[in-house]
Image (cartoon, rainbow, N blue to C red):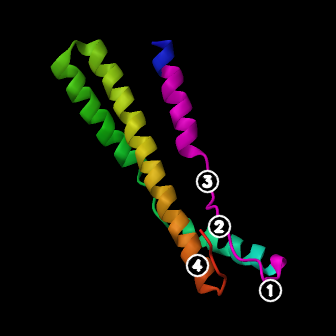
Amino acid sequence: MKKSALIIGMATALITLPLHANVIIDPEGVEMGQYQRDLNECHQISQQVQRTGASSALKGAALGGALGAITGNSSRAKKAAGAGAVVGGVGSRASTNAERDRVVKNCIRNKGYTVLN
């Protein structure tokens, strides 16, 4: 039981860590101070992308619990529900971060920078 609690705790920490887009621009003719201000503004805009982690984690928990109940006893159902919550939350976090990454890169492009990645 302690092992599953540790795994869930670690996954929760990963889900809540803020990640920033890795934007590579062509620096030719770029005033880097202005670029940093523009990049920060674009990161702020990207925060408008809604996180869906809680609902995905709940769906994962429900699915995992149901599968655990079908295939075994209540202890297995609880473990499967926890695993489903972790998988659902992590998958959702990755999706949200990918969308935020696209927003940042599009924002930087719209400000006139040449994005290379």
Residue under the image location 58 percent in, 85 percent down: 110
Tag nearer the camera, 2 or 4: 2
- Mark 4 — residue? 107
Q: Earlier in the sequence, mark 4 or mark 1?
A: 1
Return the x and y of residue 37 as percentages of the image width and height: 76, 76
User: Is 114 on the left or on the right of 69, as rendered?
Assistant: right
Q: Amino acid at mark 1?
A: Gly
User: Quick one: label 1, few (<14), some, or many (20+) residues within 10 Å?
Assistant: few
From this view, report whether residue 13 is shown above or below residue 81: below
Report whether 116 appears left or right of 74.
Answer: right
Q: Which circle's residue, 2 or 4, is located before the other in the chain?
A: 2
Looking at the rendered structure, the secondary structure element under dot 4 is helix
Instruction: Residue 29: give its label.
Output: 1
Indicate which disc residue 19 carries: 3
Asked if the stretch drawn in magenta spans residue 64, the answer is no
Neighbours of disc 3 within 10 Å: few (<14), some (14-19), many (20+): some
Mark earlier in primary sequence (3, 1): 3
